[in-house]
Amino acid sequence: MVLENKVREGVEVKLLIYNPETEFSKARVSSVPGENKTLADDINQAINNFKSVKEKIIKNHPTLTDKFEIRLYSGNASMSAFMIDNEVRVGLYIKNRTGLTAPEIRVINKGKQADIFSIIEGHFLDVWSESSVLNGSP
């Protein structure tokens, strides 16, 4: 898996997930037609998946425990972002679309887009500093 490979390479993984206990998470209904799920349900499933990945990394590479951290954010969600190395994929929050059905913008940090990349990275670090460590995370 990509995350395990990155951790083995010495990359610090910071996984910031929107808190499923917020009213927004509980109220927003899944965009999948016919499913009676909330965003909180989807987030809890993602948390369980990422906790399993982290447990596998810790089991296979005990010295890398501090290289993978999962935190929860409870503030206003403005976007989703997945950043590896010099690339970030920004997911937009659009009415009636969640997760994989929402459009995303890909930003690569190389020259002319560096300002956008830096702004997104700065936003992430600000939100990270306001987040809490996931309870029960290894």
Image (cartoon, grey):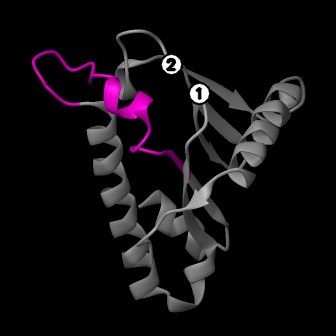
Asked if residue 14 is positioned above or below residue 111 in the image, the reply reads below
Who's the residue at 33% across and 25% down the image?
27
Please provide the residue range marked out in magenta: 16-37
> Does the CB distance between marks 2 and 1 fall below 8 Å?
yes
Circle number at residue 79: 1
Asked if residue 56 is positioned above or below residue 69 in the image, the reply reads below
Who's the residue at 60% across and 59% down the image?
132
Query: In the orientation shown, which residue stands out farthest toward the bottom?
Result: 63
Who's the residue at 49% across and 63% down the image?
134
Residue 9: image quadrant is bottom right
Asked if residue 133 is positioned above or below residue 39 in the image, the reply reads below
Q: What residue type is labelled 2?
A: Tyr
Magenta stretch encompasses residue 71: no
Question: Which of the two residues, 121 or 138, is positioned nearer the viewer here?
Answer: 138
Asked if residue 59 is positioned above or below residue 47 in the image, the reply reads below
Which x, y percent locates residue 104? 53, 21
Asked if residue 41 lies left or right of residue 112, the reply is: left
Circle number at residue 93: 2
